[in-house]
Amino acid sequence: MAWAGGDCVSAPAAKMPDTIYVGPFIYDVHNDAATWLIVTAQHGKPCRGLSDHTAQTIWLDPTMSSTLARIVLLHEVLHACAFAAGIFGDDEIPEEKWVTHVAPQLTDAITRTPHLARYLSGDAT
Ligand SMILES: [Zn+2]
């Protein structure tokens, strides 16, 4: 949805980014059905998205609605931001400290991957 002259204008949703920059890392994003079946079979637990920081890859369930896909992609990007900030796996970290460490990484990801912000907002172009 885009704003033009104070009126809300519907626009087709932006395409999901193929790559996302987070700190020094470049993540590939995949949401094809064949790969998703293999990845989730290997993972062994039900989920809608997965991040592999070693492979710098984010996989998403291709059956999700466009709204849920945007939310799950942002969830996985936040995992990537936490990784780039040095927060690993199940580290217990106070909320304020987590946000302080992750905010610069998220800002970097959105700044260096402008298509990500357009996709997350549902805007076209
Ligand atoms: Zn998660």
Image: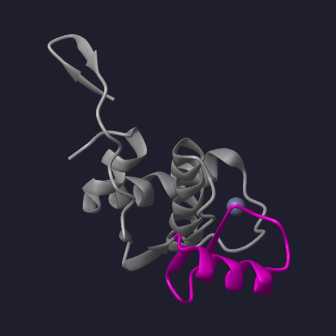
75 or 87: nearer the viewer = 75
The residue sitting at 60% across, 74% down in the picture is 33
**For the magenta stretch, what is the residue range?**
31-58
The total number of labels drawn is 0
Query: In terms of image quarters, where does ligand 1 lie?
Result: bottom right
Q: Position of residue 4 (x, y in %)?
A: 17, 19
In reply to whether residue 41 is colored magenta, the answer given is: yes
The residue sitting at 52% across, 46% down in the picture is 66
> In the image, 103: left or right of 95?
left
In reply to whether residue 86 is colored magenta, the answer given is: no
Q: Position of residue 87 (x, y in %)?
A: 63, 69
In this figure, which colouring scheme has been used for the structure? one colour
Q: Position of residue 56 (x, y in %)?
A: 49, 82
Q: Is residue 92 above or below residue 123?
A: below
> In the image, 80: left or right of 10?
right
Kindly indicate the quadrant of the structure image that contains residue 13: top left
Q: Is residue 3 above or below residue 99?
A: above
Q: Is residue 9 above or below residue 98?
A: above
The residue sitting at 42% across, 46% down in the picture is 120
Q: Is residue 52 above or below residue 94?
A: below
> In the image, 53: left or right of 115?
right
